[in-house]
Image: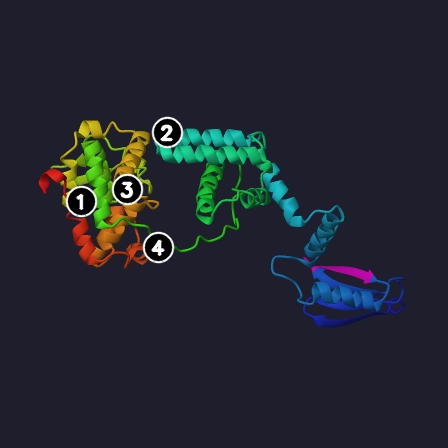
Amino acid sequence: MAERNIATKALYKGIRKCERKDRRNRFGVEWKDDGKRRFRFFPTSEERDTFYKSHFKAGTVEDFSLSEWLRWQDLKREAEEIGIEPETALAIARRHGGQTLKAGKTLKDATTAYLADAERRRRSEDYLRHLRSFFARLEASLGKEMPLLEIDREMIQAFFDGLGVGPVTLQNYRAYLTALFNHAVAEEWLDRSPATRLVIPEPKSEEPGILTPKQTEDLLRAAQEIGPELAALLALQCFAGIRNANVTRFEPGEIDAKAKTITIPAAKFKTGKRHVIEDAAPVLWSWIALADMEELCRWTARNYNWRKGQAFKAAKIDPPKNCLRHSFASYRCALDGSAEKASYILGHQNPREIWQAYKATASRADAKKYFAIKPAAEK
């Protein structure tokens, strides 16, 4: 042992610098791994010290032996030599190596399957139309035959960056894309969605566009001239805040004039849960009484939107986006002095969000005028 002349110095627990004068590379590092002594040697003390400081200064890591750490360092170095980051190699392995994934599915397979599922769940025609339009743009950009397993976040981000649309539209598109890939994950075509951590600009805060009580009265009068069913459908939006996507999807019995309740089944409501409105403004039922309920329930979204446009034109109103729902929320908050009832009727879980969006957008005096608008025959 004397001729080997091993000199060791314990600097950190479990790790030592050592020197063996009988070796060509005499400067080493010694540690224990599973009870066995391990060594690595260098030709100069400077190289040994550099290695020691960069790798072992913190000592051993819990559940990660020194030998395992060196092995991962070698793997990282080999990955960098062929021009690939370890994280990328891992992502490729996840996308292609999962034994439970049903391989071979393309982007077109995914969009077709999700559209069919949306139709089975009776999503609105407006939703389906927007979805088809978005999927067409997505397929044109990435390619219909693009394998799902090769789509990554960078591709999706580049697609979004090149769309040239506003922040609100981008947020809607992100929702479509998230739903699409979550469906693919549920079908076991992907192990996880690539539509994560996308950089989307926040939309600028704008005051909701609402109609004045006089404009609302003019609109409903014009609608009444066109037909009683149109006036009743508009009243559902003005006095109960019904979404445009829902207003032409009612079936007989879901609007109960006798009980003064409106029921929207879970399959038709945005949250996927049954919604019942029992506190709609009393004036609503005067407008509902004008219509034949069987006839009202036969209206299509396309017919309604066209006739509604005619009513706005006859009333000489350039309508702000979603102005009927915004008007209801604004005037209901102003009438009650809170957002509790408005939030409940609109189907929102958080009254605070409704209050922040609609407070001070209308006065209580105007709210009283708004909810006193009756059909012409009742004046």
Disc 2 and disc 3 in contact, CB within 8 angstroms: no
102 over 49 or under it: above or below: above
Q: Quadrant of the C terminus?
A: top left
- Local SS, label 3: loop
**Mark 2 to mark 4: distance in Å?**
36 Å
Question: Which quadrant holds residue 46?
Answer: bottom right
Give the residue pinned by disc 3: 316
Report the label total. 4
- The stretch in magenta equals 33-41
Give me the disc on residue 51: none
**Of the two numbered discs 3 and 1 in the rendering, the one whose residue sits closer to the viewer:** 3
Where in the figure is residue 252, as x and y percent of width and height? 20, 30
Viewed as shown, does residue 106 lie left or right of 168?
right
The amino acid at mark 1 is Glu
Q: Earlier in the sequence, mark 2 or mark 1?
A: 2
**Mark 2 to mark 3: distance in Å?**
39 Å
Where in the figure is residue 316, as x and y percent of width and height? 28, 42
**Mark 3 to mark 1: distance in Å?**
33 Å
Q: Earlier in the sequence, mark 2 or mark 4?
A: 2
The amino acid at mark 3 is Lys
Q: Earlier in the sequence, mark 4 or mark 1?
A: 4
Give the residue pinned by disc 2: 120
Q: Main secondary structure of the magenta part?
A: strand
